[in-house]
Amino acid sequence: MYNITIIIPIYNAEKYLKELLESIVHQTMDFRTIQVIMVDDHSKDNSTKIMDEYANKYDNFISIKLEKNHKVAGTSRNEGLKRAEGKYIMFADSDDFFTEDACEIMFNTIEKKKADFITANYVNADFDGTIWEKSIFDQEKYKDFKLSITDYTKSFFILNSSACNKIFRRSFIEENNIQFLEEVPAEDAYFTTSCFIKSTKVYYINKIVYCYRQRNEGNRRKKSVSFNCSRDYFSRINKAYKIIYENFKNSGHIGFYRYTYAKNMAYMLYKFIDSNLLTYEQRVDILKEMRWFYELSITLKVPAAQMSLRMVIDKILKEDYEEAINYCKIIAEIRLHLPKEIRENMSRPDAKMYKEISKYDDEFREEKIDV
């Protein structure tokens, strides 16, 4: 048995894949104790050649090609889980890379803590691999601690949706039959939150283990541009959000979900507002389909992050879709003239917003609540 299995979904990643694989080969931990499962989803570049090169060179590298094309990485990751032999599981996106001691740190920590999974700090990197100075989580502010699903602020903030800055005990995943969603976006959010719901011991460590590459090129797997969200995307994300909501609801953890919802609500509305691929008729259909989602803002007592979004949601709930779309057009025009950083920050609820949400925490702490 290997100590760790690293699962890598791959699609058109020839420019960056070698850097990721080399970051594994040169780990401070003996990389021969690490199984690497590379799963290609019909790449049109030389990704499969690179995969085969490493699989032929190293016995612990496995190259898998899926039989048909899929829209997101869920199927690739699930296929990797079927083949995994490691005591623990880690994940990586094909255009990112690990710090040199990532595996050693994660393995030693989960062994010591006897945890279900560990989540760690990470850092952004430029398209050329240059690592940014500041980590995602402030290392002075956030020290190592045990997460709790009843902690709606600190634990929520640290538990990002990505599976890539984490290590999971394989037996925990298998015993609870946890898998990634397939054919829909947010597959990693479902997996991560499902693990959190089922877990009893989860820890955060503030050491940086993963480098998340920021780039502007088109990549359907990640870092997608909001302007390119299609009708199909909204149909699939709607399905994913329903499954995630039902998962929290059925487990009796709506209190924690409220904070996840606050972030997703703004994120999804701005995806809808910014998209330039939708006809008027498609926009109406999407708002009708997702009306249930925006109704939760009332049920869960989670207002939108900005007044403009509250106005849009109010029109959606009143089924005045024409006026809601008109508001969206005005917001979209304004956002076109804003710097990217400001646009991105608009979709993130701030401290004031979370404080507003926290006023009603006690109403949602009961394990059995009808929402």
Image (cartoon, rainbow, N blue to C red):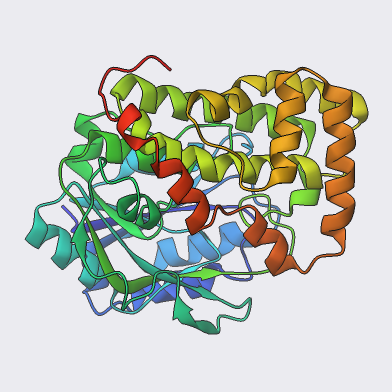
Q: Is residue 318 visible?
A: yes
Tell me what residue is drawn at x 60 percent, y 60 percent: 47
Q: Is residue 210 above or below residue 241?
A: below
Tell me what residue is drawn at x 41 percent, y 35 percent: 257
> Quick check: 253 left or right of 312?
left
Q: Is residue 43 above or below residue 120?
A: above
> Residue 119, how many percent across, how many down?
30, 58
Tell me what residue is drawn at x 29 percent, y 71 percent: 206
> Residue 217, how many percent across, how many down?
74, 64
> Quick check: 286 left or right of 360?
right
Tell me what residue is drawn at x 71 percent, y 53 percent: 44
Q: Foreground: 58 or 253?
A: 253
Q: Is residue 79 visible?
A: no
Query: On the rendered image, what quadrant is the C terminus found in?
Result: top left
> Residue 264, how many percent across, how many down?
56, 41
Q: Foreground: 132 or 6?
A: 132
